[in-house]
Amino acid sequence: MTHHPDFLWRDPDPRPAYDVVIVGGGGHGLATAYYLARNHGITNVAVLERGWLAGGNMARNTTIIRSNYLWDESAAIYEHSLKLWEGLSAELDYDLSFSRRGVLNLAHHLGDVREGRRRVNANLLNGVDAEWLDADEVRKFCPIVNVSERARHPVLGATLQRRGGIAKHDHVAWALARGADAYGVDLIQGCEVTGFELRKNRVVAVRTSRGRIAAGKVALAAAGHTSVLAAQAGLRLPLQSHPLQALVSELLEPVLNCVVMSNAVHVYVSQAHKGELVMGASIDAYNSYGQRGGVHVIEAQMAAALELFPIFSRVRVLRTWAGVVDVSPDASPIIGRTPVENLYLNAGWGTGGFKATPGAGWVYAHTLAHERPHPLAEPFGLERFSTGALIDEHGAAAVAH
């Protein structure tokens, strides 16, 4: 990766050292840098990362990819992302281990059934593949799910998106980083942003632990900490940060052939390529920037998983962790310009950040390049919180977010 010791612009010359400075070297930041170069020919770009590339939430997600969201605006941007996923390994010449094994969203009561059928119909109207399975069809598709009528949480059916699946998150990050680097983008690790320099409500430079960097535009893409960064520019955002917990088991032989999600019991389970079970749970109810959460959440997650999969009763937990997610009032992202001139925002994805990686980078790069929102990003602007045009996706994932 490029790393130039002379990248710092210490002289107060108004000319920018970089046309675009991206704050955050995770999936979205790297995807934005890649698509700025690939789609728009903008290569005078720096990606600043406080730690190491993709060492934040990108390394702490549960790798699920899908586009079966309810609302038109959400379905459009996630479907765009899924279509990019389908060709990304070939484009980046890097094995992302994208496995289209299917995503099941289980229904356990009448409300779940109605919501699931509604979502299937909405997906089909938006050109997103979706099916409704009854309990017997769920058993045939995923034989190890407990569909007994005597189960504590009986399975009445499920939605299925066959094109959904999983990918290796570290492979995705490094492929995007390598692609951006090949275009001449500077990827600068160990560079913490400590503030912004503003002139007449216009950001002109980024202050970092390694010096001042003059910038034509600044793009925030630091999941979990966006509100802290924005506050340094005098901007208060409608975001809350919460730990989102997950865990992996010891290695197992292949036993789970799909992704299984359940809103009612707040757990989602898949099996990684190496063999470990990957399980996600609810977000912790309290606000925190810590990368670990309360034990009670893990306990509830395990109880829920064993209700659905009695076969896992003797499987050992290998490790647990938490990512820090930004959650907006309507559980949908915020993408676009801010009231501070030349300061741009990509945040609030909640649990949807990983699956949106290429799509978010694509629309964010377009927004930066053209100084106006990409059509897919336009509904997700900050102004919706004053106009009331919310995109309420609470319940869109198998977590309480």
Image (tube, rainbow, N blue to C red):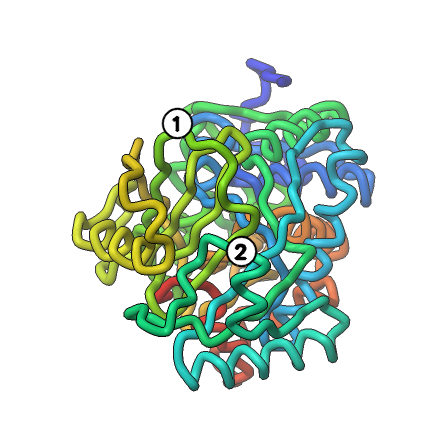
Q: Quadrant of the C terminus?
A: bottom left
Q: Residue at x 54, y 70 (%)?
A: 136
> Label 1 is placed on what type of residue?
Ser
Q: Position of residue 277 (x, y in %)?
A: 42, 40
Q: Position of residue 338 (x, y in %)?
A: 54, 62
Where residue 141 sits, quadrant-wise, is bottom right
Q: Quadrant of the N terminus?
A: top right
Task: Name the residue carrying label 2.
Answer: 142
Q: Position of residue 298 (x, y in %)?
A: 24, 50
Where residue 239 sits, quadrant-wise, is bottom left
Circle 2 SS class: loop
Label located before the other in sequence (1 or 2): 2
Relative to 144, residue 336 above or below:
below
Q: Residue at x 31, y 38 (%)?
A: 315
Task: Name the residue carrying label 1.
Answer: 209
In the shown orientation, is residue 297 left or right of residue 126? Answer: left
> Label 2 is placed on what type of residue?
Cys
